[in-house]
Structures are given as structure tokens and as C-alpha cells.
Image: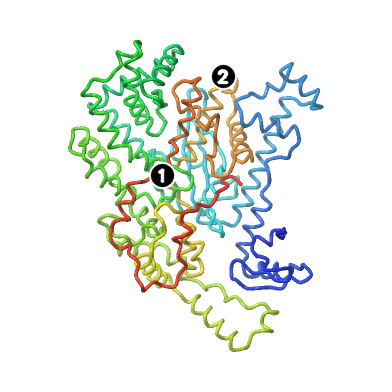
Amino acid sequence: MKPKGVIWKLFTAINRDKARCNTCGKEFSTANRSTTGLSKHAERYHKDELKDAKAADNSESVGNNSLVTLLTLAIATSSVPFNFIENEYFSRFLNRAGVFVSAETIKKTLMEMSQKSCRAVEQQLKGRNRLTVVFDGWSSNNCSFHAFSVFVVYIDSFFEKHTKLIGCKSVDGPSTAEKVAAVIASVLDTAGIGFDNIAYAVSDNGTNLIKLSETLNLTRLPCICHLLSNFFKSVFESKLLAPVMKKARSTAQTLCRSVSIREKFFSFAAIVKPGAKRPKSYSNTRWAGGFLLLRDYIESAEVLLSVPELVQNLPSTEEKTTATSAIELLVDVFSVMTTLESDDSTASAVIPNVLALENHLMSHAQSNSKIGKVIKSEFKKRISEVAKNMDFLVLTLIDPRFAYHRSSVGKTDWDKVEKTFIKIHERNCDTGKQSEPEALPMHTKKNISPLAILMNTEAEDDTTSSSLKEELMKYKSFVTLSKRPDLFSNPLHFWRLNSTNFPLLSTIARELLSVPSSSAATERCFSKSSYIYSNPRRNRLHSSTLDALLQTSARAHLISENTKIFTTRNGDSEDDFSSDSDDESVQKDTQPRGEKRSREDSTEVLEELAKRPNLASTSNEPEILDTQNCGNDDPDYDFED
């Protein structure tokens, strides 16, 4: 039987009388099932790891299994208003089950659960620095205020990534940079975080958010998915595609409004083109919604020809040719965008993906067509400049999949990136006294000669005296001479396995790889908000109640691991469509802000990098753990613990 207890998160039982430390590899006696030696060792030498283990073990659940708590969770994670509790028949049902509760009691319980969740997050973030914050604003015609949601992202000592919803708060009046700063500071304060604890910020390119970051001296990185979404929008609004997009939207609206026409569409689709998707009108905030609409519209053109009410919306031959060329050019852009908006993406992959897409658009067979020239022009104007962003370049250096590869940063010189990296981080690594060498446990010393102890101490002294520059040289040698981790692997695997070989760089990696490539977390939060306020019986909720609903939904253990933070029926966001659809088979095809694609289909253009030089293995490899066999298994991330 596997031993239980927090301490066993840091140790592995060899047998009934021995255990090995997972961090330093030392062995200890556990005779008579005693863990005293293990606890003392962890408290003295592995405080951070012990803290993370305790935080994970003591992570407070969002309520217990009492009927009132479960009822509150049901209200919080659905579209049912609080006063439904007082419905005559539902009240009778509850009374027969022995539950006597009012709407006010449910609301009070919700607030208590929200506060409890906030305290748990505050405890988990206590003492952490160099965090990444993700924030964005939201407003809706269904509510009377403008709200900002704030997420914090960090990587713990086990190299596991955590994304925490800190809160959602309304702004009084115009959303100026000063007011937004006050709101974000207030939200962060609830978790015991100040702006001095923040290293990076990720947001869209809103003027107030840019000014806010400059005022607070935050290193702000733009959300790459927002940039790509604006790129898609400008392409579909061009003169070449505007007419066919108008027909596509008209078709989608007709199919949405008429049940009979929709039934005809699916009947003919089963005969003419099985599996054809119904064109849908997506909301303006849906990332690349125009691409999904145009793709489904062109693919279903044969079916539309069979439906009399939709014949007038058929594209002309020229329009179909132009649209088909655009789809061929943009499908890989959409695939990369879907990958970059995923929960486990990191900003370190932004520049390699941008350069790969640029190369793809330039070399495509349709690149010199009229629509190809428009797409290349818009990409260069809106996206290409990202490849020159030094903040993104520094993040690329810490990712072993791309570091020091001559194709992954374009024309930028790696020496320049390395100098900037050292300038930013050496003051945090080289100044100040390093931690004292770890002494051997007393019971172990009895069985080791003085010479062995001396040699062990000397080896530890060599490790602690290593500088950031020396580690970078060692790191460069490994990634250029040895086989890199798989392009689709998680770089945290590499740093977890090689943290002892690169103690300084692995610490920096925990900071830099926590920066997501997009602000998708806030977008999903706003999808949930729109879902709540779209119900006429809930659109008068106060912003504090909205915050409590979001907090409880985010950390409710009803949400499974490694899924989108907020989900509704069939995994779809309610605001993805401009109007509701009663067709489940169609709804299942889409997800909030993107579509699921197979691992083989996503980021295919990145494989071009793997074919370039500098990735060959040689016989002069440093003795560092090889991650080639463990890069394919992504860790399961529990986003809200």
C-alpha cells in the first residue's frame, strides 16, 4: 500500500524501512514507520517543495457534500436565477427531501464559498514573487457596468503550471487607465498581491491597458490571439472577400431563424455531402469567427444549391475561387491560433510560430494571387513586428525547443538576445549569497568515510559557484549538440528533469514559462459572464454577485482537469453564436475561442523548423538528462486546484 501523508509527496518509499528524497536523492530510515527524519530533512533543505505540497494537500474544496452546498453549486454553474429556489413546486420537492432553504440562504452560502475560495488562493500565492498577471475588460448590452477580470499564473517547485482567477470587479464610469489600475490593484489585494510581485502582464492592445502597463512599469506582452483575430477580421473585410462574407452571413442567419429550412439543409446534406457543417453566425468577439463561417459556407455550397430558399445566397464562380484560396492560405494560421490559445501554451512559442506562418504565407502556391497579396500585406502590417519584440525573444531563449536555433528568431542575432537575457536576470542570480551547501543527514554520515564527505562538499561547492553565464554556455551546448525536446512537448518537462543541472536557469524558467501566449483565460471568463447575463432573469445581478458566481464556478470540482476553465453545454460558449441554435449536432463541433484539432494537425507549420540544420545529434553530448522520450506526455494541469 502506498504511504499516505503530505511528506510522501516529497519522498518515495523503497521498502518498509527506507525512503528516498525525490529532490536530492538521499535515503533515510523509516524504521517503525517513522517519518520524523523525512520531515526534518524537508523542513531544513526543501522548504519551497514542502510548502507547495502542503498547499496542494490543504487546498480547500468549494464546499462539502451537504444538500445546501450542492444546491448552491447547481445555481452557480447554471443559468437558473436565485429566486427559482422559491418556486412553489421546487420548494415542495426540497421540503420532501428535508431541505428548507430560501433564495437569500443560497446567496449567502454562495458568498461564503467564494470567500473561502479566495482565502485558499491567497494561501497558495503567499510568498510568491515574479508572477504573471492576465487581465482584460468586458461589457455587455445586458448589464449596466464594465468589468475587469484578473488571473494570476505561476509555476510551482514541481514545475506544474497554475492559473488562478483572482477576481472580477466593475469600473465606475469611463475605463481610464487610472481607474482600471485601481480596480486591478483592488482585485490583487484580495489575494495579498501587489504590483511589485508581478513580473509580466498579458492583455490585448487596448489603449487604456497599454497606458496602465507603462504607468505601473509592467512588462506587458500583447495577446497574440487578439492580434491574429484582428488580422482575420481585416482580411475578411477586404474588398475581395466582403461580398462573399455578406452572402455567408445571410445564409447563416436564414438557417438560424427557420427550423424548416434548417431541416431541409440537413436532409439534403445527408445525401449530397454527408458531414457538411451548417454555416453559423459568430459573435464579433469570437476569435477567427469569420474564418469558421466562410469555411463552412464554401464547403456546404453544394448543399445550398439543393435548398430553394438559399439558392440566392450561392457564391459566384469568382467569389468561390477567391474564398477557397483564402481558406487554403489561412487554415494553418487558424490552426496555430487554436494552439496558442490553449491552456498550456507559453509565450516562448510565439515568435517561432509567427516566423513559420510568415514563411508559409510567402511560399504557398496561392501567395501571388490577389487574395494572397492581401493576406501577406495584412499579416506583415499586424503580426510580423511581433518577431522583433525583445521580450518575446528573451522568452524564446528559455524554451529548449527553440533556443539557439538559427530559424526560430529570424534575422535577430542570438548573442543580442543572450546579452539582454543576462542583463535582466543576472542581478537576481549572481548577486547575494547563494544558499548553503546541503549537509548530509547525521544517520547517513556514520556510514560514510571523511574522504567521501569532503568530496561531496567539494562537488556541491562547484555547483553553487556556477554563474548564469556558465549555465547558459552549458545550456547552449546541450540544445545545439543534443537532440531537442519534441516540438509539441511541454518545455516544463525539460526543466523539471534538468533542474539540478541548471539550478539558476530552471528558476528563471519557472518565471518566464508561466507567461501564456494569449489572454484566453479572461475571454472564457467573459463567455461565462455573457452566459449569465443573457438570461433576462439574471441581468440585474450586482458585480459582486457576478464575481462570486465566477469564483465558485472556476474552482468547483465539477470542472474536470485539463479542460477549458469555463464550459457550458457541449463545451460551447453561449456567446459564440449571434443567436441560439437548437441543433446539438452542430453545436458539438465548436468550442470557446477555437476548435479542437488533433495533435498531428496543430502547428504543422512548425515542423518546418525541425528540418533546418543545428538539430543533429553528435557524440559530444553533455551528460544531461535526455528528454526525447518524455516530451510527448503533457502533465495534467488542475487550473483551479
Task: Give the colour scheme of this rendering.
Answer: rainbow
Quadrant in which residue 561 is drawn = top right
Dot 2, crowdedness within 10 Å: few (<14), some or many (≥20)? Answer: few
Quadrant in which residue 272 is drawn = top left
Q: Report the residue at 27% width, 24% height from top.
A: 242
User: What numbered label is drawn on residue 340?
Assistant: 1
In this view, 465 is above or below 352: below
Quadrant in which residue 246 is drawn = top left
User: What numbered label is drawn on residue 141?
Assistant: none
Dot 1, crowdedness within 10 Å: few (<14), some or many (≥20)? Answer: many
Is 127 on the left-hand or right-hand side of 336?
Answer: right
User: Alpha carbon of mark 1 to alpha carbon of mark 2: how far?
Assistant: 35 Å
**Residue 212 seen by the camera:** no
Q: Given this view, does label 1 or label 2 mark the residue nearer the observer?
A: 1
In this view, 100 is above or below 19: above
Instruction: Name the spot of residue 390 as percent of width and height, x first.
Output: 33, 55
User: What numbered label is drawn on residue 536?
Assistant: 2
Residue at disc 1, secondary structure:
helix
Q: Identify the amino acid type marked 1.
A: Leu
